[in-house]
Structures are given as structure tokens and as C-alpha cells.
Image: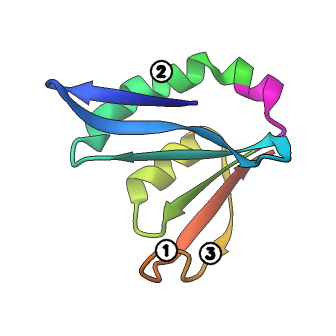
Amino acid sequence: MSWAVWLDGQPAAAYGFSYVTPFDRERWQAWAFGTKDFKRCLPIMTRHLKSIRPIVERDCRRLQAIAHVDHDVAHGWIEGFGAKREGLLRSYGRNGEDFFVYGWA
């Protein structure tokens, strides 16, 4: 599942869910990325995700998200949806960056 937010005729953010593994369709990975206008996209993304929450709760046993340790906007947004920070993934990024893992169970 994936969606995009367009601002001023241009894509500004994309977000969605994917299965963590094809063998377990009840564990999902949430993801999002965007341009410098990402913050402007958050209200519409939040409304949409709240509207599909019943589907997620019905079909997903565990939802997780991974966010760069310095992305404070992402941390606040993810925690605002009720996720708990579960750990630090050291050197997880392509260039050795650290990331936090969040989970809903």
C-alpha cells in the first residue's frame, strides 16, 4: 500500500506499508519520505492514516517503523500515533547512520 502527497503540482511526500516478509502478512513495515516540504504534508497524511486505522488494526498484528536518529519530526509523528521506541539500530543506514526502531503491537 502506498500513497503520495502533491503540493503545488509536485510530489512532496510518499508513505505506505509493506510486509516485513512475504511469509508473514500480519507484520508490516511503515515507511515515509519526502522533500523539504514534508512537514506541510503531515496533516493530510495524518488524517488519511487515521481514516484507515481500522483496516490496519484488523489486518496487522505488528507494525514497525524505522527513523533516522536525528529526524525529530518523524519521532514525534510516529510517537503521536502511539508507537513505542524499541531500540537503536547502529550503523543501519547506507552510510553507517544510526536509526531508531518503533513498534505497535
Q: Quadrant of the C terminus?
A: top right
Query: Circle 1 sits in a helix, a strand or a loop, which is it?
Result: loop
User: Residue 89 shows which numbered tag?
Assistant: 3
Residue 102 falls left or right of residue 25: left
Residue 63: quarter of image: top right
- Amino acid type, residue under disc 2 in the picture: Arg
User: Residue 47 shows which numbered tag?
Assistant: 2
Residue 66: quarter of image: bottom right
Residue denoted by label 1: 93
- Is 87 located above or below residue 47 in the figure? below
Is residue 31 in the magenta section? no
Residue at 65% x, 56% y: name it.
Answer: 102
Give the magenta-colored segment's residue range: 56-62
User: Residue 59 shows which numbered tag?
Assistant: none
Is residue 57 in the magenta section? yes
Give the label, 3 or 2, closer to the camera.
3
Give the label, 1 or 2, closer to the camera.
1
| Residue extending farthest front | 22
- Amino acid type, residue under disc 3 in the picture: Leu
- Label 3 crowd bin: few (<14), some (14–19), many (20+), radius 10 Å: some
Looking at the picture, how far across and down is residue 77, in whole percent? Answer: 48, 44
Query: Circle 2 sits in a helix, a strand or a loop, which is it?
Result: helix
- Label 1 crowd bin: few (<14), some (14–19), many (20+), radius 10 Å: few
Residue 53: quarter of image: top right
Residues 85 and 53: in front is 53
Q: CA distance from mark 1 to mark 2?
A: 29 Å
Query: Circle 3 sits in a helix, a strand or a loop, which is it?
Result: strand
Mark 1 and mark 2 residues within 8 Å of each other at the beta carbon:
no
Mark 1 and mark 3 residues within 8 Å of each other at the beta carbon:
no
